[in-house]
């Protein structure tokens, strides 16, 4: 009987670990990285050429539907909707959000999503905040000295601290420096996949069959 109890405890523990792992690793906006920020373009005006880029380092697609974009000031608020463009950030995708999606007037880059005049980036200090009805999900703050005229600031590691950003050295479109929608100086990677839920059920089924076989041999 003690072997039966031990086996059952181990089986349930393994099943619980698999299920918890599968659910706890579900990807969300909080997993995104803000990888590049163009706050002060030179080839075009700020109102036309501002943009920033996010990267999805997870193995799942992440939806922006219903998410709020804001800073700490009043009047700089945007709610993501399909009116602005695509709402799904695919696994391993660099995703560009911009004030202006017209390549003829925005400095010649392609935007995945356009937030328009609802949100802007100052050249001195500002914040980029993603949130939902429950609270903040993702935030980046920058202060005086961070913004460079005519160049985006690229993230060089997976830690979003201002000291880990540097001015881009690659040109795009009408001559500003940046890599909108593509890997910059630092190429980010996708995290390993979480254990799929069906695998947990397979483990449970396999263990259950083994347990039944053991009980039959004992009763024979």
Image: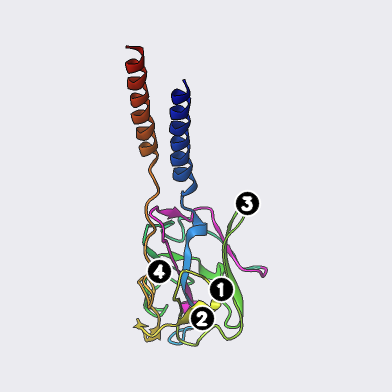
Sooner in the amino-acid sequence: mark 4 or mark 2: 2
**Upstream in the sequence, badge 3 or badge 1?**
1
The residue that disc 2 covers is 46
Q: Nearer the viewer, mark 3 or mark 4?
A: 3
Viewer-side residue, 45 vs 206: 206
Look at the image and give the residue range highlighted in magenta: 46-74
* Residue located at (45% from left, 39% from top): 19
Q: Identify which residue, 194 or 173, lies in the foreground.
A: 194
Q: Are marks 3 and 1 in contact (CB under 8 Å)?
A: no
Question: Which image quarter is the C terminus in?
Answer: top left
The residue that mark 4 highlights is 111
Q: Earlier in the sequence, mark 3 or mark 4?
A: 4
Residue 172 drawn at (x, y percent): 35, 81
Cβ–Cβ under 8 Å for marks 2 and 1: yes
- The picture quadrant where one finds residue 161 is bottom right
- Of mark 2 and mark 1, the one earlier in the sequence is 2
Q: Which image quadrant for residue 156?
A: bottom left
135 sits to left or right of 170? right
Residues 36 and 11: in front is: 11
Q: Secondary structure at mark 3?
A: loop
């Amino acid at each position: 009987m003690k072997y039966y109890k031990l086996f059952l405890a181990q089986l349930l523990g393994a099943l619980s670990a698999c299920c918890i792992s599968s659910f706890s690793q579900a990807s969300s906006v909080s997993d995104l990285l803000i990888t590049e920020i163009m706050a002060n373009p030179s080839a075009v005006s700020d109102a036309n050429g501002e943009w920033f880029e996010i990267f999805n380092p997870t193995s799942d697609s992440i939806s922006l539907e219903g998410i709020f974009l804001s800073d700490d000031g009043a009047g700089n608020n945007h709610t993501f909707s399909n009116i602005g463009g695509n709402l799904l950030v695919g696994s391993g995708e660099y995703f560009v959000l911009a004030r202006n999606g017209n390549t003829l007037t925005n400095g010649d880059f392609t935007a995945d999503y356009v937030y328009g005049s609802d949100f802007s980036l100052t050249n001195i200090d500002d914040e980029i905040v993603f949130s939902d009805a429950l609270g903040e999900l993702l935030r980046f703050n920058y202060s005086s000295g961070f913004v460079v005229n005519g160049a985006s600031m690229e993230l060089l590691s997976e830690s979003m601290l201002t000291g880990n950003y540097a001015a881009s050295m690659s040109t795009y479109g009408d001559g500003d420096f940046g890599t909108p929608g593509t890997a910059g100086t630092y190429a980010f990677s996708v995290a390993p996949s979480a254990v799929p839920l069906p695998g947990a059920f397979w483990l449970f089924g396999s263990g259950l069959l083994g347990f039944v076989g053991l009980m039959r041999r004992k009763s024979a």
